[in-house]
Image (spheres, rainbow, N blue to C red):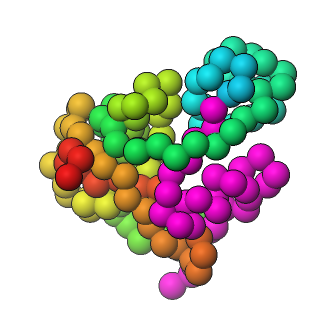
Amino acid sequence: MTARPVPVPDETSAEYWAACAEHVLTLARCSNCGQFSHPPDIICPLCHSPDPAFSFETVDGGGKVRAWVTIHQSFLNGFDTPFMLVDVQLDDQPTVRMIGRLLDGPDAPVSMGAAVTLGFEDIAPGVSIPAFRLGGAA
């Protein structure tokens, strides 16, 4: 099997990916408006500050499912199909939505508004990406 593609951190995202490698979710917080955003960019997507001076802060990562899709055919090498992706709105950071694999599998009984907790997929040595599991906080 071909290896999955891995993220290539840049100057803006390096701190985020380093935390993910430790199974910790950090999000960028704008120094101007104080809001979280994901992914960080050269301007704040919320207040449009051209100098957001983002700081990365650890967050819980729990949320609610907004939408989902089961992928039956991948156009990228390295993905075993089928798998399910979920669009999650984070509970403690309502301005942030994340998309990740549902670790419960493609046949999991997901529904709109279902609670999810944060998990991680280790996809290569030292590389982990956020993912989700059904269920509220333990």
| Image position, residue 53 (x, y; %) | 78, 32
Disc tally is 0
| Image position, residue 138 (x, y; %) | 20, 52
Residue 7 in magenta stretch: yes
Direction from residue 137 to residue 67 in the image, left or right: right
**Extreme top residue here?**
47
| Image position, residue 131 (x, y; %) | 41, 55
x 72%, y 35%: residue = 54
> Vertical placement of 62 versus 14: above or below?
above
x 71%, y 26%: residue = 31
x 53%, y 67%: residue = 22
Residue 67 in magenta stretch: no
**Residue 15 seen by the camera:** yes
> Vertical placement of 128 versus 67: above or below?
below
| Image position, residue 30 (x, y; %) | 68, 27
Direction from residue 6 to residue 95 in the image, left or right: left
Direction from residue 111 to residue 103 in the image, left or right: right
Viewer-side residue, 122 vs 22: 22
x 64%, y 52%: residue = 16
Viewer-side residue, 133 vs 107: 133
**Residue 71 lies in quadrant:** bottom left
Direction from residue 13 to residue 133 in the image, left or right: left
**Extreme bottom residue here?**
1
**Residue 128 seen by the camera:** no
**Residue 69 lies in quadrant:** top left
> Vertical placement of 23 versus 60: above or below?
below
Task: Tell me which segment is drawn in magenta.
Answer: 1-29
